[in-house]
Image (tube, helix red, strand yellow):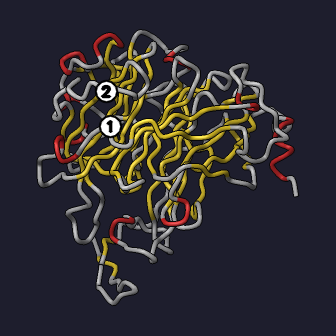
Amino acid sequence: MDLIVNQELDGTRRDYIDYGPAVPPQEESDYIVQVKWDRYRYHCAEGDMWPQTWGLDGNLYAAAGDNKGSPMNFWKVSSYGAWSDSKRLDPAKLTNTNDWTLDLVDELPVDPKVYCTNPKAPSVKPAGLLDVDGTLYFAVQAQNYGEEPTFNRQRNLHGWMITSQDYGHSWNREATPTDFFTGRLASCHFLQFGRGYQGALDGYVYAYFPCGEDGASYWENGDGMLLGRVPKEEILRREAWSFYAGRDRLGQPRWSALETDAQWVFRYPKMTGENHVCYNPGLRRFLMGNYSFIDNQLRPRPIHQMSWPQAYRSQLTLFEAEYPWGPWKLFYRDDDWGTYGDYQPSFPTKWMFEDGHLMLMVSSGSWDDYNFVVQKMAVRLKGESGFCEASRYFDYR
């Protein structure tokens, strides 16, 4: 590969690898054919990452990295008015005032001084969060800020889980050893279903593992994702996990207890992020938001090669699939997402309305949008004449 010769604003030379234009290899969706966004975005709290889950108690819960002087903390997302358990959305409400708010529950669920003793991975960040029948499973990851001078991706070295029976007021920090997941499995992202995991496909919990072709796990600009599953009663037993290993001769998914047998369920070389996946029961589809960073010529370039105030933009791609293992189809693409390069898109299962046609996307972004960012999104399916009625407020001037 050729190198792009690059000089930062401070005069530092930081060359990076030219991998060519970032173009998703997946075919376009023939099911979700159009997307409409609210022109407004709503902000609350501080920090980034924001994996979240719909608790059995009716609240959303979320984790964040890098805020309030802490590398990681845990939040309760309280809903009011428009976000009632009846799931009736009042589309006239255009701001978050009295609709939802975030309250800090635990400012440091995991102390890196205790649990990140490997000098190659000194920092801790949230990966996945899942409520199963009132028990919270919080997947965390130990990471560094990159080791490759010419393609400096933030790297995850190992991951594990802590649990809570009281929604983060206390934790079992010894629920698993800190090397529960390693290598390309270091970052565990749970597949989200309904409240307390209601509406799940079967008796398994599913999780995605974003990783690179080199066998490592990266926060940005990875190569694809693997898929694992485990009986929901045995989440904390590593031997109970198995991994998608392709299809049998009848086209059915094969599962193997051997990590080495795991095959890609999603591939976008040098442009796969730490993605979250959810099930939208109204649409009867699994949805995934993907992000990674690009330069002005659409070439992949990790943001961790840069420093403030210089930053390149990110690319947002949204995908749908009938099954957790795909095949994934592209239904939206934005090559200049956010204001300073946004990242970590997800769709809370509690915030889905109008038979799944109206959703709220949570994300965060570099520098100015470094918080819990919410934006409404409507979709139109093939054969439908227009968007849902509530989306008429998206264009309000």
Q: Earlier in the sequence, mark 1 or mark 2?
A: 1
Label disc, if present, on residue 109 of the rendered structure: 1
Q: Is residue 75 left or right of residue 84?
A: left
| Quadrant housing the C terminus | bottom right
Most foreground residue, 292 or 268? 292
**Element assignment for label 2:** loop
Q: Residue sitting at 70 percent across and 30 percent down?
A: 83
Which element type, helix, strand or loop, lies under badge 1?
loop
Q: Position of residue 362 (x, y in %)?
A: 57, 44
Residue in view at x 30 percent, y 79 percent: 14
Viewer-proximal residue, 123 or 4? 123
At label 1, counting other C-alpha atoms closer than 10 Å, the crowd grade (few under 14, some 14-19, many 20 or more) is many
Q: Quadrant of residue 207?
A: top left
Residue 255 vs residue 42, the one in the foreground: 42
Q: Identify the image quadrant of residue 31.
A: top right
Question: In this picture, is 272 found above or below 163?
Answer: below
Kindly identify which residue carries mark 2.
Answer: 171
Q: Amino acid at mark 2?
A: Trp
Total labels: the figure holds 2
